[in-house]
Image: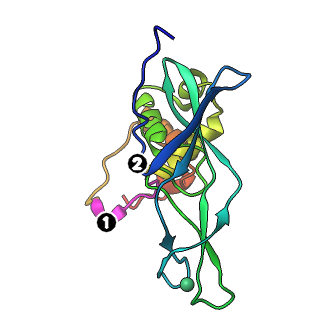
Amino acid sequence: MDNSIQIPLDLPDVRVLKVSKTKEGDWLIRVESTLKGTNCRKCGRKLTQFHGYDQAIRLRHLPIFEQPVFIELRPKRYKCPDCRGQPTTTQRLSWHDLRSPNTKPYEQWLLKLLVNSTIVDVAKKLDTSEERVTGVIERRIATKVNWEKFQRIEILGIDEIALSKRTSRLCGAHNNALDTSRS
Ligand SMILES: [Zn+2]
């Protein structure tokens, strides 16, 4: 094609296998890890004995020209010859958190979009669910209050309390954090 361009994927330790468009019009980028080995989840030793691939996972990634992008990867699994029962460990990649449905660059971008926006706004803009946005906040932002850091608590206005309660509820933090404040 005359008007196509090539840009680097910019995710470390992977090789692109195939790029295609889904029926929904999203970009699907299939990748494989180029990293060899991982550390045993039990004993921590470096494992090199390849056991096989996990089921493919599809992760939401940064959009390209406003088209949604998904990265598909089959994580590698390694066997520990030293631990009892020879357990296997799934290899992790630096740009993905275990159990997250997104890549890390996507989650960081989503957090930026939350500046001066509500969770509902961001979910709409990204064509995703509020639960997914909340999930990103829970993974990326500490929601516990460290009371040691406060010497005294200023009197909060009603709006601030309402806002804080809403934020903490949405973040899954304890709702009563403010009610039980040691003022
Ligand atoms: Zn082990």
* Residue 124 or residue 94, whichever sits in front: 94
Which quadrant: the C terminus? bottom left
Whether residue 154 sits left or right of residue 108 in the image: it is left
Image x and y of residue 113, in percent: 44, 28
Q: Examine the rendering and report whether any part of residue 147 can be seen.
A: yes
Query: Is 72 above or below relative to 89?
Result: above
Query: Is 178 above or below relative to 79?
Result: above
Residue underneath mark 2: 12
* Residue 17 or residue 167, whichever sits in front: 17
Tell how many labels: 2
Mark 2–mark 1 CB contact (< 8 Å): no
* Residue 114 or residue 148, whichever sits in front: 114
Pick out the residue farthest to the top: 2
**Marker disc for residue 148:** 1
The residue drawn where x is 51% and y is 28% is 118
The residue drawn where x is 48% and y is 59% is 180
Range of the magenta residues?
142-149
Whether residue 155 sits left or right of residue 42 in the image: it is left
